Image (tube, grey):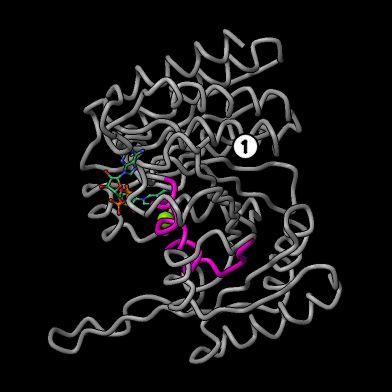
Amino acid sequence: MKIAVLPGDGIGQEIIPQAVKALKAAGGHLPLDLNQGEIGWTSVVASGEALPQSTIDLIDRSDAILFGAIGGPEYEDWKRKNPRGSPLLRLRQDMKLFANYRPITLFPELINASPIKAELIQGLDLLIIRELNGDIYFGEPRGMVSDTPGQRESINTMRYTEAQIRQVAHAGFKAARRRRKKLCSVDKANVLETMLLWRDVVTEVGREYPDVELTHLFVDAAAMELIRRPTHFDVIVTGNMFGDILSDEAAMLTGSLGMLPSASIGTGAKGLFEPIHGSAPDIAGKDIANPLAAILSAALMLRYGFELEEEAQRIEGAVRQVLARGLRTGDIMEKGATRVGTQEMGEAVAKAIAAG
Ligand SMILES: NC(=O)C1=CN([C@@H]2O[C@H](COP(=O)(O)OP(=O)(O)OC[C@H]3O[C@@H](n4cnc5c(N)ncnc54)[C@H](O)[C@@H]3O)[C@@H](O)[C@H]2O)C=CC1
Ligand SMILES: CC(C)CC(=O)C(=O)O
Ligand SMILES: [Mg+2]
């Protein structure tokens, strides 16, 4: 079980060590081979490259990747002068990770930590599947059209092929089949031709899954429905950008962006597992970030990367236990709970795993 561990930048450096503790506690009996690599700004500082060859080699010889986050103000500045694209987007594309699974599950212990009314989120369990290899994040042409002062113009292109849509649509229907058999496809087919194609292809693929109820929503209405009646959703399948935005919104239903893990799965056997949040420069280095999204991403890695369901459940059960004991990082803090830091939370989860 060769695992490339890429903490990245900002809070990535704080939360990934907690996920590693959980992995070691749950997988002590397994042949875990964890190897750390550099990526992002941390890597630029160390070697001048955001995605050095050493990290590419490490990924090549690994079975799965545990990723933290990259980015931050210095990095965004550096990227403007070195526009070679995001190393994370490059990894997602090179590894053909076309589907990003973002389970939006509410731990019942956090029902009052969410800013959304308890009666709206009781029993919340939805899955957003975000297409990860296409859309406006990758479409060509892109870049500056004119840099003449006063007439500056820039372009990005929303672009999808039928094959890309078909691939992620199948992932959506298959996931719905394993769950409550409801798939909602989210697009913007009322104004975007790319999204008209999206809707047509998802509808065609749907004919192969007559047992799954397919509905369509425009993304603006979907954003509203996620707050109005989130438990009506089972699986949502959507494009790269809409999925990016809707899943951060949906995270708040569960209490915090710091609670949501994700699994990026592709045509190959190798997956990438990461919290959905970024490097959070505003709280980095203070030992206050919530490590649970990263810890839960390690659980997804055991489940989907290595088919170790029992070990994955041990991690998830331990997270639930520490929440039930009232331990909370600041982002999910509520009255009567015990505030803990990143490391303390990570250690509590690892101990709960070890105690079984
Ligand atoms: N996968 C990745 O590597 C991602 C990288 N980014 C990058 O991260 C940098 C910061 O981006 P932002 O827009 O600020 O998004 P962000 O997700 O880093 O933070 C948004 C807000 O949520 C809070 N937050 C995030 N994770 C948290 C956690 N685990 N515990 C407690 N609070 C948490 C932050 O403190 C901040 O107030 C940017 O450079 C961006 O490009 C953003 C999203 C994903
Ligand atoms: C590079 C960005 C697309 C990262 C992000 O916001 C995400 O994956 O959720
Ligand atoms: Mg995002």
Q: Which picture quadrant has residue 231?
A: bottom right
Q: Residue at x 37, y 81 (%)?
A: 155
Q: Quadrant of the C terminus?
A: top right
> What is the three-letter code of the residue carrying label 1?
Leu
Q: Which residue is drawn at 47% across and 58% down?
A: 247
Reply above or below: 308 against 344. below
Counting from the top left corner in percent of width and height, residue 178 is at 78, 52
Q: Which of 60 and 328 is in front in this view?
A: 328
Residue 49 visible in the picture: no
Q: Quadrant of ligand 3?
A: bottom left
Q: Quadrant of the N terminus?
A: top right
Counting from the top left corner in percent of width and height, residue 83 is at 35, 61
Residue 212 magenta-drawn? no
Q: Which residue is drawn at 63% across and 70% down?
A: 184
Q: Give the range drawn in magenta.
A: 235-254
Q: Residue at x 60, y 31 (%)?
A: 299
User: What's the magenta bit mostly, secondary-structure-wise?
Assistant: helix
In the rendered image, which residue does mark 1 sit on? 300
Q: Nearer the viewer, residue 87 or 98?
A: 98
- For numbered disc 1, what is the local secondary structure? helix
Q: Which of 123 and 140 is in front in this view?
A: 123
Q: Which picture quadrant has residue 3?
A: top right
Q: Nearer the viewer, residue 229 or 220?
A: 229
Residue 313 relative to residue 187: left or right: right
Residue 248 magenta-drawn? yes
